[in-house]
Amino acid sequence: MSQPLFGLVPAGQPVITTPNESPTPTTFFFAIPPSPTPKPSSHIVVFLLPGVILPEGTAAAIYLVTPPGPNQVTPNSKFLGGIGPGKESAIFKLGTSAGQNLVLGISVEQAESVAARMGELGASASSPGTLAALVPAGVGGYGGQSQSSPLALVLAQRIIKNAFNFLSSFSGTAGLNQVEVVPLKAFEEWWRKFESRVRTDPGFLERDN
């Protein structure tokens, strides 16, 4: 898994696609830059990059990693949710205080395990249909409904592909680790053009071009 797999968009910040560290082929750590405004990042969007297909039966588990507290040696890790086939993107609430060094961990794990932990987060975090999309039909008590709306999946993939193709031309590097970033202004420009095209040609995403 040497190619970039995931994109992150912290609230009010550029897109990040390159992890700061990847200790294993299925584990990735992304350092979230400090917020450019006094208000700390409270939400983050995580999505699969266009063309990325996770190994069959797997999903990406998303973790918030924070520095160790008093009398602790290892960092704290909090499971936020997951993305995968049928759920290529999601918004997660970080709920952190200003000044904290934030790291988002993404681990490619068994889809059944990820879906089960998502269920434990409660219905307020994810709907049953969202969970079902992460695992094959009939596995672990989930599935069976995710195949009934392939158009929604195709449209989601094409929206992400449309955004990625537009934003990739604006990408650059920043920081000591030369993290790949995209200016927020570029994302705003993509959204303006995308929204305009949807209004003038609502069916363009349904055409395979």
Image (cartoon, helix red, strand yellow):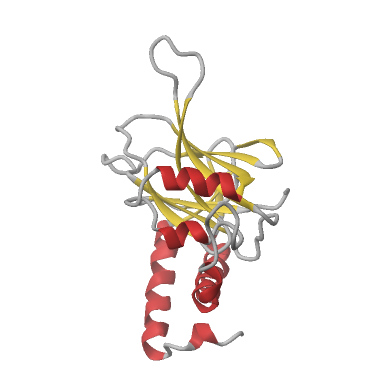
| Residue 96 picture location, percent across and down | 33, 35
Of residue 41 and residue 175, the one placed in the foreground of this image is 41
- Of 154 and 177, nearer the camera is 154
201 relative position to 148: left or right: left
Tell me if residue 38 comes above or below residue 145 in the rendering.
above
Q: Residue at 44%, 63% (x, y): give it.
A: 129
Between 81 and 52, the one lying in front of the other is: 81
Where residue 26 sits in the image (x, y, percent)? 67, 42
Q: Write the residue at 32% across / 38% down.
A: 95
Against 75, residue 59 (above or below) is below
Which residue sits furthest top?
Answer: 71
Quarter where residue 126 is shown: bottom left
- Residue 135, percent across and down? 58, 57
Where residue 131 appears, x then y in whole percent?
48, 56
Determine the residue positioned at 51% across, 68% down: 145
The total of numbered circles placed on residues is: 0
| Residue lying at the far left of the rendered structure | 38
Please say if 6 is above or below 61. Answer: below
Picture quadrant where residue 128 is located: bottom left
Q: Residue at point 63% right, 46% down?
A: 110
Quadrant placement of the C terminus: bottom right
**Depth check, front residue: 153 or 171:** 153
Left or right, 7 with reference to 52: left
